[in-house]
Amino acid sequence: MSMNMFKKLLQTPVIFLSKQNHFLRMSSDAAATQTRQTSNIEKSLNQVTLLGRSGNNPEQRGVAENPVVTFSLATNINYSKGTEIMQHTEWHRISVFRPHLREKVINYLEKGDRVLVTGRISYLERKDTGNPDIINKNANS
């Protein structure tokens, strides 16, 4: 997505409809301005849910003070191309930081297991040592 498309998306009014509370709320520039005037804290959401298969056995990494368990997760996108049904696989690097979840993942998860992951996305940037013009970005949840 280009930066211009992203800016247009941010400027587009968003409408939320909740069946439980039976209300309709519209967020626009005017509403955002009013929100900023009444509250210094803007609400946002960073949440992801992935369902797929583990691509490898979990690995424990890090140091004793900050251990982390990582594994890869494959999710599929199915689409049709003419009369054929095609499948594209996306790979995600999952990092588990919570102690009780780390233990369960390292003890029970195996390559090929079906996994449901919920968490948040954070982007880490690392420069390639071989080529300073290349920056690798990984999404962790």
Image: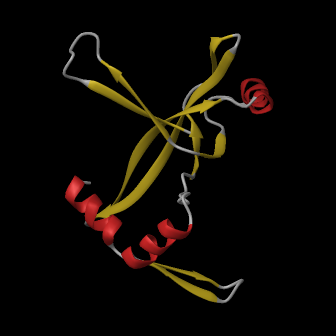
Taking depth in this image into account, of 32 and 110 the one nearest to the observer is 32
Q: Is residue 96 visible?
A: yes
In the figure, is residue 59 to the left or right of 13?
A: right
Can you give x and y, in whole percent of width and height, for residue 25 in the image? 54, 83
Up/down of 27 relative to 104, above or below = below
Q: Residue at x 71, y 10 (%)?
A: 64
Residue 45, quarter of the rendered image:
bottom right
On the question of residue 57 being in view, the answer is no
Where does the image place residue 6, in percent across and percent down from the top left?
29, 59
> Which residue: 56% across, 39% down?
141
| Image quarter (top left, top right, bottom left or bottom right) of the N terminus | bottom left
Between 24 and 57, the one lying in front of the other is 24
Residue at the far front in the pictured view? 37
In this view, 35 is above or below 117: below
- Judge whether 32 appears above or below 108 on screen: below
| Quadrant of residue 81 within the rendered picture | bottom left
Q: Is residue 34 left or right of residue 19?
A: left
